[in-house]
Amino acid sequence: MLDAAITAAQELGPHDVAIVLGSGWTDAISSFEQAGDDVPVATLAGFAQPTVAGHGAVVRSLRAGDVRVLAFTGRSHYYESRDVGLVAHAVRTAAAAGCRTVVLTSASGGMRDDLAAGDLVIVSDHINLTGASPLVGATFLDLTDLYSARLRALCREVDPSLAEGVYAGYWGPNYETPAEIRAYRAMGADIVGMSTVLEAIAAHAEGMEVLAISLVTNRAAGLGGRLDHADVLSTAAASVDRMRALLEALLPRL
Ligand code: 8IG
């Protein structure tokens, strides 16, 4: 494991579950008991300062029943640096802190006909469009069960109304063209975003169980109106009570 991840993990202390909070998700952890002071990522080894509106810059330790949760209030996206090591650093730090499970949350664009702004989607699988991997060398990792069937079933038990779908991980930072969206739909993707896939691969390589949940905040390019990050944040704000209820029920059971 990387030295910086071990150093950062020692600073944060032992935990059971990590959650990475995507655009608009930070308010969804507001009801949990806090187990220590927030740690600014700027003070932690190996972390970059987040640059995206709607993403926080601290790591927070929470109690969810008996579960010690390490919450990353922001994330590093591939488009911010084109550095896969920075993108994977939070999950590698979580693994070094003892986390056996990671929950990757995100916002995304909906492509499947039944997915509208405000819908929550459990990620069943992904298509990595970034052309990148956080792994280097002859690490021929099997991704057949990347998104844990056990955790997906648990999530559906907690909220049977949740949709499931395939997440296309786009490189960004521009959104797709309508022609790209038609292509990705034809490839079998249901939602599209700019995160999750590289972190999921890194977490699987660390032996962690991965759950990913995405809030659809817009219809993808060519399928609705124009795309605007401000609309992403306002849709997330309007959905935060459902996101909070889901995490309140889910995290203590992980
Ligand atoms: I929120 O439509 C959000 N993130 N690539 N496309 C991509 N990322 C997104 C989208 C979208 N919406």
Image (cartoon, rainbow, N blue to C red):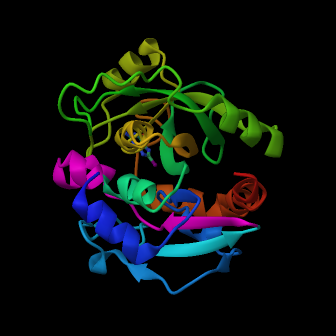
Give the quadrant of residue 226: top left
Q: Nearer the viewer, residue 168 or 151?
A: 151
Q: Is residue 92 magenta?
A: no
- Name the spot of residue 116 as percent of width and height, x first: 62, 38
Q: Is 39 rendered above or below residue 80?
A: below
Ligand 1 quadrant in view: top left
| Residue at image coords 23%, 33% | 132
Left or right of 249? Residue 136 is left
Left or right of 236? Residue 198 is left
| Residue at image coords 55%, 40% | 209
- How many circles with numbers are drawn on the protein? 0
Residue at the bottom extreme, as displayed = 37
Give the quadrant of residue 183: top left
Left or right of 233? Residue 78 is left
- Name the spot of residue 252 as percent of width and height, x first: 74, 59
Q: Is 42 rendered above or below residue 101?
A: below
| Residue at image coords 53%, 66% | 70
Residue 58 at least partly seen: no
- Name the spot of residue 150 as percent of width and height, x first: 69, 33
| Residue at image coords 32%, 34% | 176
Q: Is 217 rendered above or below residue 47?
A: above
Give the magenta-colored segment's residue range. Answer: 66-88
